[in-house]
Image: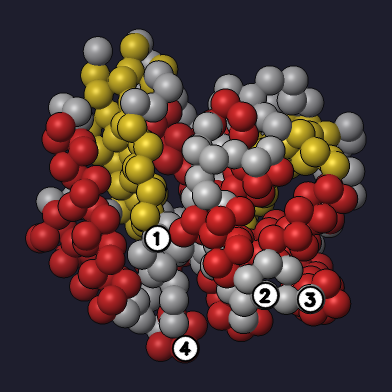
Amino acid sequence: MKTIAAIDVGSNSVLLSISRVKGNTPGKPIVNLEDTPRLASGLKETGRIGEQSTGRLIRALKRFKRSCDEHGVEEISCCGTSALREASNSIDVISEVEVKTGISIEVISGRREAALTYLGAVTGMKNLRQSRVLIDAGGGSSEVVIARGTKIHSAHSYKIGSVVLMERFGMDRKKSARELESVLECIREQVVRLRIGPVDRPASLVCSGGTPAAIQGYRIGMKQHDSDSIHGASMKLSEYKQLIFELGQMSLSERRLALAFEPKRAEVITAGGLLSYAIAEQTGLASVRVSDRSLRFGLLYELAGRKVEFA
C-alpha cells in the first residue's frame, strides 16, 4: 500500500492531506494539516509575495514535510495557484521554498486548478444530480466548473478572491447588516461580468473550500473539525447568506470563538462567504451542497492514477 501526500499552496491557506492508496483509490486522509501564510496579502499593490508571507509559507511547509516523513510518504504533489501564478517574484519564492524545505511547488493553470478541484470536491458526495455546478471561492481566485457526471464541460478560474476583497472592504472587522449588503452589491457587480452558465436543470450546486466548510461548521456549532459533518451537507442559499451575515456582524474576537474549530479563517470568512454567495446567485439554484474537499483531494486522486475527464 503506497502512502501519498497532496499540498495545495493557495493565496490564503496552505493545506496538506496524506492518504494511503489501495489499487488506484486513495483512502480517507490519515493526516490533514492547514496553515494561513496569506501569500496574496498586499499582492495587488506590490505585484510581489512579501517576505513575511514567504517566511510563513516556509515554516508551514517544513511542518508538513516533517509529517510526511513521519508517515512514510513516498510521493508528494505540491501545487501553487493564483498568488504564485501572478506574483512577479514567484520563481524566487519557489526556489527558496525548495532549498529550505525540500518541497518542489508546481504552479498550475487556472483551468487545471478548476478541474482538479472538481475532481476532489465531488468525491464521496452522495445523491448529486447529473448536472452540476462547482464553486470554489479562494483567497486569490475563484474556480467555477460546469459538469455532467464525471465529465467537465467548462472549467474557469476568475481573478477575484477573498483576500483582496477583505483588504479592500475591511471585511476582517465587524460590519452592520447595511454595510454587508453594500459590500455584497459591489461584489455582485464584479461577478455579473463573469457570465457564468448556462446550467442545465435540474442541477446540483456544490460549494467547496474552507469558507463554505467553516460556514457549515458554524451552522451546526462544531467545536472540532469533523469532515463527516460537513461533506455533503445541504442548505438553502438564503440560509447560507444569513449565516454569512451573522458572522460578518461579529467582532473578530467573537468570530474566532464562533469558529472554534478553525479560528484562523475568521478574518477572511465574511469576504469569502459573500463572494461564494454572489457567484452562487448567478446560477439561479436555490440550495447548495457543501464540500469539505477540493484541490488537494483532486491531486490525491491524480497521484493514484485517476484522470480529469473533459467532455
**Label 3, label 2: how far apart the Cα atoms are:** 7 Å
Task: Please state which of the two labelled residues, at mark 3 or mark 1, is closer to the viewer.
Answer: 3
Residue in the foreground of this view, choosing between 110 and 96: 96
| Residue receiving disc 4 | 45
Residue in the foreground of this view, choosing between 255 and 47: 255
Is residue 271 positioned above or below 235 on the image? below
* Residue 296 image offset from top left, x and y in percent: 42, 40
**Label 1, label 4: how far apart the Cα atoms are:** 20 Å
Task: Please state which of the two labelled residues, at mark 1 or mark 2, is closer to the viewer.
Answer: 2
Mark 1 near mark 4, Cβ–Cβ under 8 Å?
no
Mark 4 near mark 3, Cβ–Cβ under 8 Å?
no
| Residue receiving disc 3 | 176
Going by the numbered disc 3, the residue's amino acid type is: Ser
**Label 4, label 3: how far apart the Cα atoms are:** 27 Å
Where residue 202 sits, quadrant-wise, is: top right
| Residue receiving disc 2 | 174
